[in-house]
Each structure stands twice: as structure tokens, then as C-alpha cells.
Amino acid sequence: MDLDQRYMDQALRLAARAVGRTRPNPVVGCVIVANGKVVGRGFHPQAGEPHAEVFALRDAGQKAQGATAYVTLEPCSHTGRTPPCAKGLIKAGVSRVVVAMSDPNPKVSGTGLQMLQEAGIEVTTGVREEEAKSLNLPFITWITKGRPMLTLKMAASLDGKTATRTGESQWITGPDARKYVQGMRNRHDVVLVGIGTVLADNPRLNCRIAGGRDPIRLVVDSNLQIPHSATIYESSKSAPLWIATLKNNSVAKINRLTQRGVKVIQCDETPAGKVDLAHMMQQLGELEITSVLSEAGGILSDGLLNSGVVDRLALFLAPKLIGGQEAPGLFKGLGIAKLAQAQEISNLKVTTVGGDLLLRGDVI
């Protein structure tokens, strides 16, 4: 491993500390190196706060003069909530800037690099580019598609069953897998379920790990069936409850929900009389949501997949066999007619979480 990769890895680790905290901004890390030693470190903690380069330059002080800055994302060249970082690096007198990936934001997209080069700073790009893109997939998806990145989290037995034929599903996976999911909630802006899950399981959908933060809880409820006594209303003191429903729903029902502090997102209707999930995701994008974790059941998961809004898969498989035709599988609905129509998964990684398998990949 060369030195550029080694220092960029440090910057990436810094950036990862803020995953789930920066919406709608990207996560960015910066390391400043002088005479073979790291003299400055920084990462962007949340929107409205200084960017990673600012923290790293403050940390480095005068030692930034003539140093090399390693940044996981192209330094910004425009004034938004904070001043442009490219100008900050120029003013500090760095001699070289190493960048993992260019910024997909049209407001930047190459202009930050150009500004640095025009100031006589040596610029190297593409160091750990794929790792940086993977880390910032929520931001990239939001910028390029106008909607948040969606991770489809599912759990099943080795034979693909999500419950027994009588509906018993708690717990298919073990405690380590369930703790891992709590960490996933901590890293996503929104956790999503359908009304069926609320009626069947009465979930809390909050984050129950030390130092974690609750995501926004979003329920897809086409006909506003959510009970007044549902636990989800009061399961978080820090994160709101949102409900996605149809535009033509009862004004009285919607008013009752808003009076309880619920944000109601009114969506287009599909021919089947359900929430148009693609329209819902576009509205989430307009609300500056960059990442969604779906913990939905088979019906909503099938709808999300068919709507083309699933970007990543996280599938837990428990080392047990349930069997039987009546035991439900991962997806409901008709399914595809030909194998050529099957959704493919790329960059598949298989790890173990406790006694369970975790399959992670990108949906293409």
C-alpha cells in the first residue's frame, strides 16, 4: 500500500464517523500531512457545521504551509452554508491536495479541483475512489436521482422463509444480528415499514444502542389504518413520526395525525389503490432525506423492488430451515415470469454476524 492510499484510508475512517449525521451533505474526512507526519485531522459532523478541511486546517495551524491535504471528496468551490474549502486550502498554503472522488453536485463538479490547480497546487485524484463513493452513496443518489438511497433489510431462514406457516417470526435471527440492525438505524436518516408491520408487530423503530440516535420513523399507510394506541407514536423523543398516505384520504384523519405531531406525506395513487412508492421517494428527496432503511414485510418490500427504488440489500440468513409451502417468503406478489427479469446483485459480500449470515450488495 502506498502512502497516498494509507493517508486516504485515515481520511475515510474520519468521514465514516459522521455517517447518518450530515444530511443533506456528504460525509467528508480530511488529513493533512507534513514531513511524513499527520499534523491535522477533521471531518464534517453535520450540515451547517464547518467542513472537514476547515477542522483539519485548524488542527494543523502553521504546519499546513507546504503540506499535503488528503480529502475524501473534492473540496467545495461555492459559498453555501459555509465558505468554499478550496479557497481555505489555497489560503493555508498547502502544496498538494489528494482527492478520492469528484463531487457529483453540479455546483462543484470539477470546479474545486480547477480552483486548486489554477492556484498552483498539485492535485491528485482517484485515490480510494470506490471506497469514497460507497461511503457517500446516500449523497450521490440524492444528488443524481433526486431521492434518497434505500437499503432493503430483510431476515429469513436459510430456505428463504420469513415466518412459520402460523405467522411466528420473532426471532428468526439471533441477538447479534438484531444489534447490528440497531446500528443500521443509527446510520440512516429514515427507517421505513408498512402498516402491516405496525398492525402485526407494534414496533418502536428507534435506536437502542449506546450513543445512537433515532431515525425518522416512516410508515406507508395508504388508508390511514394506524391505531391511535400504536407504540410508534411515542417511541422516540428526538425523532418525528412520518406517514405516507394517499392524496385523497380523509382530511379529518390527516388533521388528527398532524395534531399529534405526525408529518403526513400525501402521495400519488397506483392503479392498485396503494401509495406510489417512487413518488413517495421523490418527496423524501425534496425533504432532504438522503438515506432510508426499509425493515418492511414481503408486500412493501416487493413494491419497493418493483418501483426501482432499492439501491442496497442487507439480507440476514439464520442457520435454520422452516420449510412448507404456506410459510411466507421474502417477497409477496406475482413475481417475475422469466429469469432474465431477475434483479441482480453486484459487489456481493458475505459475512457472519453472530450465528447468522449477512449478505450485502448493490441492487442493479
Image: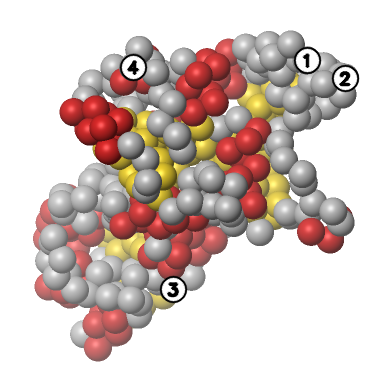
Front position in the image: 116 or 359:
359
Front position in the image: 259 or 357:
259
Is 163 situated left or right of 111 in this image? right
Mark in front: 4 vs 1 = 4
Q: Secondary structure at mark 2?
A: loop
Numbered disc total: 4
Q: Secondary structure at mark 1?
A: loop
Q: Earlier in the sequence, mark 1 or mark 2?
A: 1
Which quadrant is the N terminus positioned in? bottom right
Q: CA distance from mark 1 to mark 2?
A: 7 Å
Q: Which residue is mark 3?
A: 125
Mark in front: 3 vs 2 = 2
Q: CA distance from mark 1 to mark 3?
A: 54 Å
Q: Earlier in the sequence, mark 1 or mark 3?
A: 3
- Where residue 217 sits: x, y (%)? 37, 31
- Where residue 192 sits: x, y (%)? 46, 35
Q: Earlier in the sequence, mark 4 or mark 1?
A: 1
- Cβ–Cβ under 8 Å for marks 4 and 3: no
**Residue positioned 21% across, 25% down in the render:** 260
Mark in front: 4 vs 2 = 4
In the image, what residue type sits under mark 4?
His
In the image, what residue type sits under mark 2?
Gly
In the image, what residue type sits under mark 3?
Thr
Q: Which residue is mark 1?
A: 165
Mark in front: 1 vs 3 = 1
Q: Earlier in the sequence, mark 4 or mark 3?
A: 3
- Cβ–Cβ under 8 Å for marks 1 and 2: yes
Q: Is residue 8 above or below residue 122?
A: above
Q: Residues within 10 Å of mark 2 (few under 14, many from 20)?
A: few
